[in-house]
Amino acid sequence: MDLYPFWNSLRIAAISCGIVFFLGILCAHYVAKLPRVIKGILDVILTLPLVLPPTVVGYLLLCLLGPNRIFGSWMMSAFHTRMTMVWYSAVFASAIVAFPLMYRTARGAFESFDPTLRDSARTLGLSNTYIFWRIQMPCCRQGILAGTVLAFARALGEYGATSMVAGYTPGRTATISTTVYQLWRTNNEALAFRWVMINIAISFVVLMAVNLLERRERREVRP
């Protein structure tokens, strides 16, 4: 049994999760402070990949990253690097479809943060950077953690956009999701079922770890 789809899926999910973690927190932090009208417009734009079909996201990525498109052709001529049908193409697709989950969850956590804590910290002469990382982020860590897990799970199970921009090449671009589909197409249901169970096991372990962390935090907060 070739384990490349397993390691490739974890690699893609981890990298894309890392990208949307920082990008989602950054966008959520600044959008939460904007006026209502501007916030509403940006919310629609940043949340759009959540409601678009994954194949539409994949098509838009092909229009941008394809070898005959603006960005794709520039990367090929400047760096001799293909942006489609390679494993890291799936990182872009997974990050885009997972970003709204991280953004919406983080923004909700930031909006529920008590602003009087920030104001009190400023009266003590603390910088905005210190307040954000040492006061606001710890208070919002449950929401941040939930968004991170949702983003990782979404990236791990992404199929539609990933299959369009990265394709399916055994040992090069194959992921668990694309492998399950290809095995099903070739009537190899026994091996497809194994990969399904592996995917379920990974998701189960991740969710259990989050539940244990949340339970530990409640015990620490409880007087």
Image: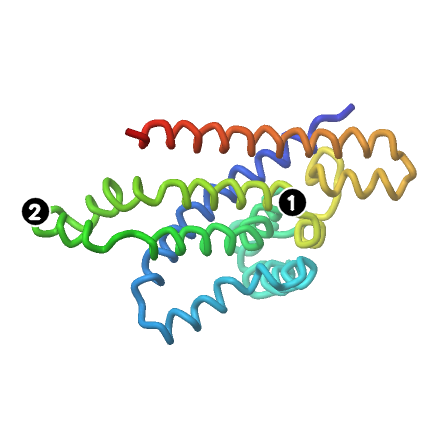
Q: Determine the residue positioned at 69% across, 37% down.
A: 172
* Mark 2 crowdedness (10 Å alpha carbons): few <14, some 14-19, many ≥20: few
Does residue 116 lie above or below 205 as drawn?
below
Front-most of 147 and 63?
A: 147
First along the sequence among labels 1 and 2: 1
Does residue 139 lie above or below 75 as drawn?
above
Q: Is residue 91 left or right of residue 40?
A: right
Q: Determine the residue positioned at 34% across, 54% down.
A: 112
Please identify the quarter of the rendering in which residue 55 is found. Answer: bottom right
Percent x, y of residue 16: 52, 44
Which element type, helix, strand or loop, lies under badge 2? Answer: loop
Percent x, y of residue 61: 61, 60
Looking at the image, how many numbered discs can be counted on the residues? 2
Percent x, y of residue 17: 50, 42
Q: Is residue 156 left or right of residue 110?
A: right
- Quadrant of the image containing the N terminus: top right
Disc 2 residue type (three-letter) = Leu
Residue 124 circle label: 2
* Mark 1 crowdedness (10 Å alpha carbons): few <14, some 14-19, many ≥20: some
Q: Determine the residue positioned at 40% across, 47% down.
A: 22
Q: Which residue is mark 1?
A: 86
Farthest right residue? Answer: 187
Q: Nearer the viewer, mark 1 or mark 2?
A: 2
Disc 1 residue type (three-letter) = Val
Distance, label 1 to label 2, CA atoms, is 51 Å
Front-most of 78 and 219?
A: 219
